[in-house]
Amino acid sequence: MIKRQINPEVENALRNNIPVVALESTIITHGMPYPENLNMVHDVEKIIRANNAVPATIAILNGVIKIGLTKNEVKSLSETKDVLKISRSDLAAALTCGKTGATTVSATMILAANAKLKVFATGGVGGVHLDAEKTFDISADLQELAQTPVTVISAGPKAILDLPKTLEVLETLGVPVITYDQDELPAFWSRSSGLKSPIRMNSAQEIARSHLIREALEIPGGQLVANPIPRNAEISFQEILPIIKKANLEAKKEMVSDKNLTPFLLDKIYKLTKGESLKANIELVKNNADLACKIASCLIEEAKKI
């Protein structure tokens, strides 16, 4: 009933205890324009292979779950317009109807866990949108983190969100928010958000051990790792905040909501920063992929000690 194809390279890695890093596909179709999206995937995959790990970009193609897209499949997806954005809610429907779509953080987590992948690198995760007390616009990513056992490496929640409320919801759901090597929560394009991180860990080994201890205790859900963007690539929070506010005002005027909101805001911010937000986005994804490889390697080594 469920059609799934695991790339032979990924299958071989899983069989032989080689680290595998899952990657989402909405960052290709909804997060970046062509050809920057295609170049980003190639660069990220090079980084992962340079770390002696295997990349596994996840998507749905013609009703088939793909765990590890080929170069041709990535190229085709990067050039295609109006691709479905698949989350937890419509994952089964997309498979039932034979659709093609890019997987969000929540759908990627589900499919990664189903394929026995434990580490997933992305850009930023969704969360509580501004004015959520009126709109109830809260990303499915948060609930997914509470129930699917994958460690997600991001640059923190996207800065377009209500960050204090996002942290509060994550705490309520029992999701560990681990900031890598600093005390302050990063905010996607910015290293600082003004918010203290709930947990700090200074090594990939600690993060891997935490994942394994959660497994041993049978605690459901995953971990959110907030990995600060490299200093030379960041846009300061003070600089980006008024731009985010302006983009949100335009979204309200045009009555953009639901799944269309985040891509709309990212596009507006890209234009308002004259492309600087995209450059920062690409660098933070690369940085997250590098840390994800280290965590995936440590997971294999630490599991041998149990």
Image (spheres, helix red, strand yellow):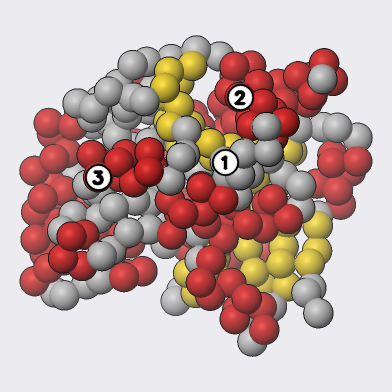
Quarter of the image containing the C terminus? top right
In percent of width and height, residue 73 lies at: 67, 63
Please say if 49 is above or below 5. above
The answer to whether residue 63 is left or right of residue 186 is: right
The answer to whether residue 190 is left or right of residue 74 is: left
The residue type indicated by label 2 comes to Ser
Characterize the local packing of mark 3: few (<14), some (14-19) or many (20 or more) Cα atoms within 10 angstroms. Answer: some
Please say if 78 is above or below 160. below
Say which residue appears at 50% left-offset and 12% top-offset.
202
> Reading the chain from its start, which is encountered first: label 3 or label 2?
3
> Reading the chain from its start, which is encountered first: label 2 or label 1?
2
Q: Which residue is mark 3?
A: 165
The answer to whether residue 78 is left or right of residue 98 is: left
> Observer-nearest residue: 111 or 240?
111
Q: Could you say whether the residue bearing mark 1 is in a helix, strand or loop?
A: loop
Q: CA distance from mark 2 to mark 1?
A: 10 Å
**Mark 1 and 3 residues: CB-CB less than 8 Å, in contact?**
no
Q: CA distance from mark 3 to mark 2?
A: 25 Å
> Reading the chain from its start, which is encountered first: label 1 or label 3?
3
Q: Is residue 196 visible?
A: yes
Say which residue appears at 53% left-offset and 75% top-offset.
90
Please say if 232 is above or below 28. above
Q: Which residue is mark 1?
A: 222
In percent of width and height, residue 255 lies at: 16, 75
The residue type indicated by label 1 comes to Gly
Quarter of the image containing the N terminus? bottom right
Q: Is residue 41 visible?
A: no
Q: Which residue is mark 2?
A: 210
In percent of width and height, residue 177 lies at: 43, 32
